[in-house]
Image: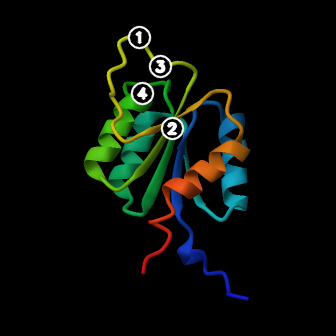
Amino acid sequence: MASYDPSDRMCILIVEPDPHVRAMAADVLEQEGFEVIEASSADYAATILQSRNDVRILFTEAATPGDLNGFDLTRIAQTQKPQIVVIVAVGALPSGFSGAAPEARFVRKPYRMADVIPLIRELTRDQSDPG
């Protein structure tokens, strides 16, 4: 059996204003072996993305408090880190939506983590094999 190396854990940034939803998602992702960083707003998440080079996945709520929303954060993340995997949780796409988050995948709210985990695994399959 291969030994588990915590340094091999893929880092995911969760942006969710509801502390209960964020904690639940973080717990599930940590149980699945991810390193989790939590943010309650896109503004704070943008700061995290600037200061950390290890974030490989951004899982954000579309509607967040503050100056930035999840779509703004997605554009920032994809500009700063073109290889980042982005998943946006949305209730419905806003009117006039015109692809403001290229390369992002969307999950409809309310989502189940049991559905999100396989999506994350699929989208990061190539990233998890450094060889």
Crowdedness near tag 1: few (<14), some (14–19) or many (≥20) residues, C-alpha within 10 Å:
few
Q: Which residue has dot 1 on it?
A: 95
Q: Earlier in the sequence, mark 2 or mark 4?
A: 2
Quadrant in the picture for the N terminus:
bottom right
For the residue pair 72 and 43, the one nearer the viewer reads as 72
Contact (Cβ within 8 Å) of mark 2 with mark 4: no
| Position of residue 25 in the picture relative to residue 36 (left or right) | right
**Which residue type does callout 3 highlight?**
Leu
Calculate the distance from the C-alpha at mark 4 to the C-alpha at mark 1: 15 Å
Distance from disc 2 to disc 3, alpha carbons, whole Å, reads: 14 Å
Q: Earlier in the sequence, mark 1 or mark 2?
A: 2
Badge 2 amino acid: Thr
117 w.r.t. 32: above or below: above
Q: Secondary structure at mark 4?
A: loop
Q: In the orientation shown, which residue stands out farthest toward the left?
A: 79
As helix, strand or loop, the secondary structure at mark 1 comes to loop
Residue 60 - label: 2
Residue at figure coordinates x 65%, y 51% from the top left: 117
| Point 31% across, 45% down: residue | 78
| Total residue callouts | 4
Q: Which tag is nearer the camera, tag 4 or tag 3?
A: 3
Q: Residues within 10 Å of mark 2 (few under 14, many from 20)?
A: many
Q: Position of residue 127 (x, y in %)?
A: 45, 66
Residue 17 spot, x, y in % from top left = 58, 31
* Mark 1 and mark 2: Cα distance apart in space: 19 Å
Kindly identify which residue carries mark 3.
Answer: 93
Mark 3: which secondary structure? loop
Q: Are marks 4 and 3 in contact (CB under 8 Å)?
A: no
Q: CA distance from mark 2 to mark 4?
A: 9 Å
* Type of amino acid at the residue the image marks with label 4: Asn
Residue 95 against residue 128 in the figure, above or below: above
Q: Residue at x 64, y 30 (%)?
A: 18
